[in-house]
């Protein structure tokens, strides 16, 4: 998650030998990403002091990599979903105060 927090935008998963993630992650994590066929991770809520979540997408049916035309709307969806994470916390706090 620390590496993901740094970019705070959709992260294309590249596990090539010279790829950034391959160099930064333990082999157990890269094996998981490869076995799970994860191609793109989109942040929903990323903050070290609260809940964190992200969307995980596999390969596109076209087998083409995710481009900016894919990542921009997915980022918007992630931002909208982040609002849902904030609402339940607010409602719980309001109930506790009453």
Image (tube, rainbow, N blue to C red):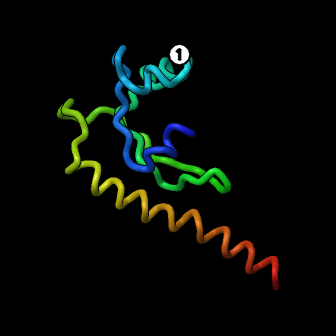
Closest to the observer, 22 or 28: 22
Q: Which residue is drawn at 48% across and 21% down?
A: 30
* Label 1: element kind: helix
* Horizontal relation, residue 74 to residue 47: left or right: left
Label 1: how many residues lie within 10 Å, few (<14), some (14-19) or many (20+)? Answer: few
Q: Name the residue under label 1.
A: 27
x and y, in percent, of residue 26 in the image: 55, 19
Position of 10 relative to 90 (above/below)? above
Q: Which residue is drawn at 34% across and 36% down?
A: 12
x and y, in percent, of residue 88 in the image: 64, 69
x and y, in percent, of residue 59 in the image: 30, 32
x and y, in percent, of residue 67 in the image: 22, 43
Q: Residue at x 28, y 57 (%)?
A: 73
Quarter that holds the N terminus: top right
Q: Which residue is drawn at 49% across and 17% down?
A: 31
Quarter that holds the C terminus: bottom right
Position of 92 relative to 98 (above/below)? above
* Horizontal relation, residue 12 to residue 81: left or right: left
């Amino acid at each position: 998650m620390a590496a993901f927090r740094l970019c705070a935008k959709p992260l294309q998963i590249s596990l090539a030998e010279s790829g950034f993630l391959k160099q930064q992650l333990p082999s157990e994590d890269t094996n998981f990403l490869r076995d799970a066929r994860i191609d793109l991770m989109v942040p929903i809520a990323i903050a070290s002091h609260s809940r964190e979540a992200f969307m995980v997408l596999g390969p596109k049916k076209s087998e083409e990599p995710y481009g900016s035309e894919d990542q921009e709307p997915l980022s918007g969806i992630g931002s909208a979903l982040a609002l849902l994470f904030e609402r339940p916390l607010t409602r719980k706090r309001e109930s506790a105060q009453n």
